[in-house]
């Protein structure tokens, strides 16, 4: 390795993704690409065909007799606990035992010599059910008395009902908000390889290796130390691999232990989408009290969530919906409550934003209600109600890093918002077939796991005697560039070229007890943990160099490719080799925990978030009023990532999140039939955005002047989730186009997603009202 | 008779003596050859992660097109050149300009869709280096990316187009030798079997007629864009299967009529439509994604009798006819008479669609509309074709057919009656829009409710009127991006 004085890959540079070159060549290994052990077996799940029922007869003889079948496993074949729940509530069986709670629930698994044989065998099961009543959506579940899957939450400040009573104006509404399938391009997959003693090694596509480890140990009835979990990278996660991989890892591990052979399970896309959880759909009843100027006085709301048959992450997801029920606006008196409803559907789970989007979009609906009621531009209402530093959120955290006024000012100018809004109004006034809409919506998103103990991370750095560096941390790479950004932090610390650093797979053998790579926290936590390890080694190197080259410690500096002692630059590799010869410890484990945060769920008070990330978007759409189809003509985004560690990667996160958020609210529709079968379970029926669905003009900028006011890693901010909610601007713009049919006297109040059908039917309702154009 | 399946895989000759009817190209690549750069994302031709290039000899020489390996049957690759992502590199192993641009523009995040996207863009770069944004988006209609929002991918495609290097491209350099090797693989009928399954690749159309007389219950597989799913999704047994994707490619255009062999793909038909039926060209690009259009054939779209049938509504409106063949016997029928009921067509065992005859009706006002939840690569909620003749301000003939509204693609008789003989005015089309409600009792499903389908069907009459009467009125969404 040559020594360099011009080094690449430092913090705050547009360093390419560490896997990019391999990815474009098809050489980046995903779990299904790993060399398969000799004698590998394949598993396939058998899924229930009943939304709620008692199993009265289960005939699996034909499954067992099918070609290549080695074994069929049911609930009675589990060595430890029949449970993969993520939260200790013990409500998430691997295989249904006696009763099935949703259509598509795993009932058994076939183990066969080939994947094709396993799939064909699974279809031969004959299971009879005694059907029981089922409820699919949260309101039906409430009416049927299905109860909650987990404890609900209420956030309150002041006296909302009294303030509502006293408010000069009040509006009530109901808002249906659809769910969303993750549609990670790489589906769920796990491959388990048995070892000696009780050991098993699992390669699995997961955002949460430690949880796989703990759950599998539980299922097998062995200590955690017997289970090793590895993941080099995922082909997308988006929250769908925070808990949902547990099932697959557990099945593969059980079969591998039982048969002493490696076992892989890779469900087909239909089984994956049928049997794994999604973003929660919500029905929200809201009421807002406001004054004639449009100032919000009181907000009350009830968030009914379709949680599915078990709790999974529904507790923290529905909590976060409430944490973001205010989005960026100050509610003087407020009461918001969650209702995590049990339903006979797959158990919903984490998805980018984690309930936050379903809070934020209601805040935006509320501002629209006020604006239309007062005949004002919704932007004026939004600006009027923005938090000012020092004001309290509904969970009693003080906002003190507000930067939205500056972001608004910049985006209003750069998007030419006011002139374009007038042009849209003028266009619609002509009453043609194509109507337009434009909307500016902000996001304020709280960063930290609300489960405070998750806000910790570890790392492990080895420097080898040739000066090459192995970097490991507890975060997982799912495309977001986490490994690249953490490596940049280490390259910066050592002032060495990023090519010296090998980013290794995430494994529970190197860093224990990690948190999920989730809540946008990957870089914040793991970057700091890696920096801690680097600083430990640096301190030892400084001591060593100061002694060896006879200089005061403060005269030892890390400069590009070298360590400088006084006026002498010693090449990195030379220093390292000398340190090794001098028996300096060149390995360190780092650790980090987020300071300042605390949260008391019982009182609904605390500081759950270390800081907020902000952003705003302006979207303009055209709507075809004969079919309800639409196009996003233009979107402008300014988003705050603090002082970016990697502007190119962060911009990519913002663009991708925006389009994914727009997809959630437009073409992505989950559709269950009355029997409880999800009928949109593959890309042929579930439509995520294509290249031609992205904004025709797409201007994305980072707020490059922003710096985190807290001491985060290099003063950057988390980026994964917050910009997802900027897609709401598209939804609001579509609503405006539809509202033009009623001369903007009322908001369109579309439920989400605003499919072409919903849009057209709302327009037709206006057309059929006499006296309206 | 040749004893083996032969094709070229990247740089290697492959000769297989045992091949089943239902083996897919993707499984062969990933499982048998451990070429793991090609990914499985959906196994139904809808995500593009499995995109590979398929080279084949045509009358115009060797052409390469991106296709979906997941639903492509191995047996249908006889005499073809399969090019996977592993083959895409420069002479010294350096990155191809598409790959380089994808890296430099940060076009990959999780990277799982990336090889497929690179292959689709490679297909475009090869034939259309100066492609603009709309061309790029059309080329990516069959590729899903969940991470990037596509912006950096489009930027990469534009940058690669500017980078040049087409002449240096590996496939360009070896064109002649590949063509010669593929020519050598051509020959008579190939019959294969494995594990009780049979696959037959007829030598030519006469041979196909003979094969089907011998095996009247055989599954006829053309582009496999539907049959592929019978296997990958429904695990259906398709043996014996007869692979015909290489047959019936002949095209003749005479006067006011296009005669397309049943094996003409959507992509092969596209330039013909552009020239002779430009009113339907945009419609053609709304059918499926590029990879599927490169495999799917117009004849099979008719023959498999889908209730939506992307092409039939338009073709019925135009008064298309088809030629059915059994052995040496041929019969010609009106396309609308081919569809009898849901899943039932006027085709005898051993009979096959050989030719599709499409009047281009330069005398009439023509339009084709498709409405779906997502604009591109989505299954239709409502499709329609209009063909209306007007003389002296009077509608003398109106043919309007719909897909997605009934068990088969079907004419809207009452709406047609409401138009015929009436003045060519807004009122007449309003009347037709009202009348079409009595023509159909559509179903509700996840694509659309019955109400929506009915409403859209009515509105499309209004659209047709507006477009025909005021061509300058903005009545359609503008998707094109300034380039």
Image (spheres, rainbow, N blue to C red):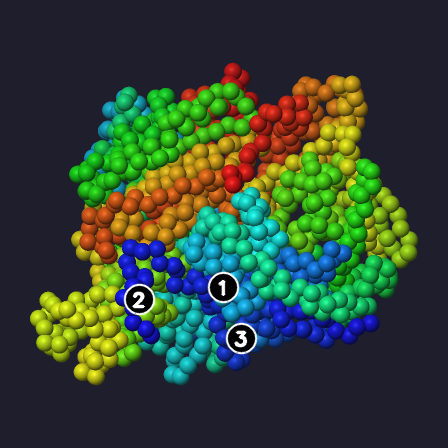
Task: Confirm whether circles 2 and 1 share one chain.
Answer: no
Residue B289: image x %, image y %?
A: 61, 50
* Separation of residues labelled 2 and 1 (CA atoms): 22 Å
**Are the residues tagged 3 and 2 within 8 Å (C-beta)?**
no
Q: Quadrant of residue A375?
A: top left
Mark nearer the viewer, 3 or 1: 1
Residue where numbered disc 2 is placed: A497
In front: B323, or B480?
B480
Q: Which image quarter: residue B119?
A: bottom right
Marks 3/1: CA distance? 36 Å
Residue occupying the point 69% across, 41% down: B274
N-terminal-most mark, 3 or 2: 3
Q: Residues within 10 Å of mark 3 (few under 14, many from 20)?
A: many
Q: Chain of mark 2?
A: A
Q: Secondary structure at mark 1?
A: loop
Which residue position is annotated with label 1? B95
Disc number for residue A41: 3
- Mark 3 lies on a secondary structure that is strand
Instruction: Tell me if A394 is positioned left or right of B265 in this view.
Output: left
The label nearer to you, 3 versus 2, is 2
Identify which residue is drawn at 34% across, 61% down: A484
**Residue B14 vertical position relative to residue A184 in the rendered view, above or below:** below
- Report the residue that reaches farthest toward the right: B329
């Amino acid at each position: 390795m040559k020594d360099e004085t011009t080094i690449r890959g430092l913090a705050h540079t547009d360093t390419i993704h560490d896997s990019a070159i391999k990815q474009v060549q098809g050489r980046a290994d995903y779990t299904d690409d790993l060399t398969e052990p000799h004698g590998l077996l394949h598993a396939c799940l058998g899924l229930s065909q009943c939304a709620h029922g008692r199993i009265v007869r289960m005939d699996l003889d034909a499954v067992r007799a099918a070609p290549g079948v080695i074994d069929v496993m049911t609930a009675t074949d589990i060595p430890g606990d029949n449970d993969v729940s993520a939260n200790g509530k013990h409500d998430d069986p691997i295989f249904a035992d006696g009763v099935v709670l949703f259509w598509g629930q795993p009932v058994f698994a076939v183990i066969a010599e080939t994947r094709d044989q396993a799939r064909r065998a699974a279809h031969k099961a004959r299971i009879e059910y005694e059907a029981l009543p089922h409820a699919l959506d949260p309101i039906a579940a409430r009416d049927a008395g299905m109860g909650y899957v987990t404890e609900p939450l209420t956030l309150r400040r002041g006296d909302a009902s009294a303030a509502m009573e006293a408010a000069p104006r009040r509006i009530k509404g109901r808002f249906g908000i659809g769910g969303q399938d993750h549609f990670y391009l790489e589906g769920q997959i796990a491959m388990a390889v048995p070892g000696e003693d009780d050991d098993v090694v699992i390669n699995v596509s997961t955002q949460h290796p430690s949880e796989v480890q703990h759950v599998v140990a539980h299922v097998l009835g062995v200590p955690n130390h017997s289970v090793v979990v590895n993941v080099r990278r995922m082909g997308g996660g988006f929250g769908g691999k925070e808990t949902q991989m547990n099932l697959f890892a557990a099945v593969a591990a059980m079969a591998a232990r039982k048969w002493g052979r490696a076992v892989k399970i890779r469900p087909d896309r239909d089984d994956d989408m049928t049997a794994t959880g999604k973003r929660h759909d919500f029905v929200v009843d809201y009421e807002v009290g406001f004054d004639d100027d449009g100032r919000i006085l009181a907000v009350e709301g009830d968030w009914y969530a379709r949680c599915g048959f078990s709790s999974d992450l529904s507790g923290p997801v529905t909590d976060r919906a409430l944490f973001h029920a205010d989005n960026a606006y100050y509610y003087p008196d407020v009461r918001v409550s969650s209702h995590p409803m049990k339903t006979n559907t797959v158990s919903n789970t984490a998805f980018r934003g984690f309930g936050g989007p379903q809070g934020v979009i209601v805040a935006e609906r509320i501002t629209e209600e006020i604006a239309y009621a007062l005949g004002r531009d919704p932007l004026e209402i939004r600006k009027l109600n923005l938090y000012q530093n020092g004001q309290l959120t509904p969970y009693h955290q003080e906002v003190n890093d507000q930067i939205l006024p500056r972001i608004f000012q910049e985006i209003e100018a750069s998007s030419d918002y006011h002139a374009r809004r007038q042009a849209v109004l003028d266009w619609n006034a002509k009453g043609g077939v194509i109507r337009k809409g434009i909307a500016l919506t902000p996001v304020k998103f709280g960063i930290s796991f609300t489960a405070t103990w998750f806000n910790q991370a570890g790392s492990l750095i080895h420097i080898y005697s040739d000066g090459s560096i192995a970097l490991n941390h507890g975060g997982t790479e799912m495309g977001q560039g986490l490994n690249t950004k953490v490596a940049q932090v280490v390259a910066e610390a050592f002032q060495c070229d990023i090519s010296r650093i090998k980013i290794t797979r995430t494994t529970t053998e190197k860093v224990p007890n990690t948190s999920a790579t989730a809540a946008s926290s990957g870089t914040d936590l793991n970057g700091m943990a890696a920096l801690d390890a680097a600083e430990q080694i640096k301190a030892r190197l400084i001591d060593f160099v100061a002694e060896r080259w006879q200089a005061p410690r403060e005269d030892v500096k890390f400069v590009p490719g070298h360590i400088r002692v006084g006026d002498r630059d010693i090449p990195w590799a030379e220093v390292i080799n000398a340190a090794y010869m001098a028996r300096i410890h060149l390995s360190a484990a780092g650790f980090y925990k987020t300071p300042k945060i605390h949260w008391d769920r019982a009182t609904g008070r605390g500081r759950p978030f270390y800081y907020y990330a902000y952003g705003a978007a302006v979207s303009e759409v055209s709507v075809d009023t004969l079919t309800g189809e639409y196009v996003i003509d233009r979107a402008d985004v300014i988003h705050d990532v603090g002082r970016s560690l990697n502007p190119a990667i962060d911009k990519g996160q913002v663009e991708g999140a925006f389009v994914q958020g727009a997809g959630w609210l437009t073409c992505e529709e989950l559709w269950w039939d009355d029997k409880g079968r999800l009928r949109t379970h593959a890309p042929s029926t579930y439509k995520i955005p294509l290249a031609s669905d992205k904004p025709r003009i797409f201007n994305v900028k980072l707020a490059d002047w922003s710096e985190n006011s807290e001491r985060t890693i290099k003063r950057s901010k988390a980026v994964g989730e917050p910009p997802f909610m900027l897609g709401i601007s598209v939804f609001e713009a579509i609503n405006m186009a539809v509202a033009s049919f009623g001369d903007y006297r009322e908001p369109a109040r579309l439920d989400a997603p605003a499919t072409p059908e919903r849009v057209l039917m709302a327009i037709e309702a206006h057309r059929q009202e006499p006296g309206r154009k | 008779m040749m004893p083996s399946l032969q094709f070229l895989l990247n740089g290697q000759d492959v000769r297989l003596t045992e091949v089943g009817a239902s083996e897919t190209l993707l499984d062969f690549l990933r499982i048998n050859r451990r070429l793991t750069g090609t990914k499985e994302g959906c196994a139904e031709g809808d995500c593009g992660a499995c995109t590979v290039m398929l080279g084949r000899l045509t009358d115009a020489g060797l052409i390469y097109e991106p296709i979906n390996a997941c639903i492509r049957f191995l047996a249908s690759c006889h005499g073809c050149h399969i090019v996977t992502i592993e083959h895409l590199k420069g002479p010294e192993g350096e990155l191809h300009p598409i790959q380089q641009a994808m890296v430099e523009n940060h076009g990959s995040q999780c990277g799982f869709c990336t090889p497929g996207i690179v292959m689709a863009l490679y297909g475009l770069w090869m034939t259309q280096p100066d492609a603009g944004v709309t061309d790029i988006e059309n080329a990516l209609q069959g590729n899903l990316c969940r991470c990037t929002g596509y912006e950096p991918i489009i930027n990469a495609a534009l940058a690669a187009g500017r980078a040049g290097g087409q002449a240096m491209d590996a496939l360009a350099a070896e064109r002649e030798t590949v063509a010669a090797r593929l020519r050598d693989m051509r020959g008579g009928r190939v019959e294969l079997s494995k594990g009780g399954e049979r696959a037959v690749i007829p030598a030519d159309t006469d041979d196909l007629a003979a094969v089907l007389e011998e095996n009247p219950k055989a599954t006829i597989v053309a582009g496999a864009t539907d049959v592929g799913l019978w296997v990958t999704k429904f695990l259906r047994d398709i043996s014996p299967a007869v692979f015909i994707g290489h047959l019936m490619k002949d095209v003749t255009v005479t006067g006011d009529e296009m005669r397309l062999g049943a094996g003409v793909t959507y992509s092969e038909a596209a330039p013909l439509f552009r020239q002779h039926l430009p009113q339907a060209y945009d419609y053609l690009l709304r059918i499926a994604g590029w990879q599927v259009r490169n495999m799917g054939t117009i004849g099979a779209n008719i023959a498999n009798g889908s209730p939506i049938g992307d092409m039939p509504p338009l073709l019925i409106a135009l008064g298309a006819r088809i030629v059915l063949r059994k052995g040496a016997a041929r019969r010609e029928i009106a396309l609308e008479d081919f569809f009898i009921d849901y899943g039932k067509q006027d085709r005898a065992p051993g009979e096959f669609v050989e030719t599709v005859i499409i009047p281009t009706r330069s005398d009439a006002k023509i339009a084709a509309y498709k409405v779906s939840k997502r604009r591109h690569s989505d299954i239709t909620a409502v499709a329609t074709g209009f063909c209306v003749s007007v003389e002296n301000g009077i509608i003398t003939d109106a043919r309007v057919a719909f897909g997605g509204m009934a068990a088969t693609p079907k004419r809207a008789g009452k709406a047609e009656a409401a138009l015929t003989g009436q003045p060519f005015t807004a009122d007449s089309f309003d009347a037709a829009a009202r009348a079409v409600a009595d023509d159909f009792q559509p179903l509700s499903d996840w694509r659309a409710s019955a109400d929506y389908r009915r409403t859209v069907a009515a509105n499309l009459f209004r659209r047709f009127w507006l477009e025909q009467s005021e061509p300058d009125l903005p009545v359609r969404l503008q998707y094109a991006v300034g380039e």
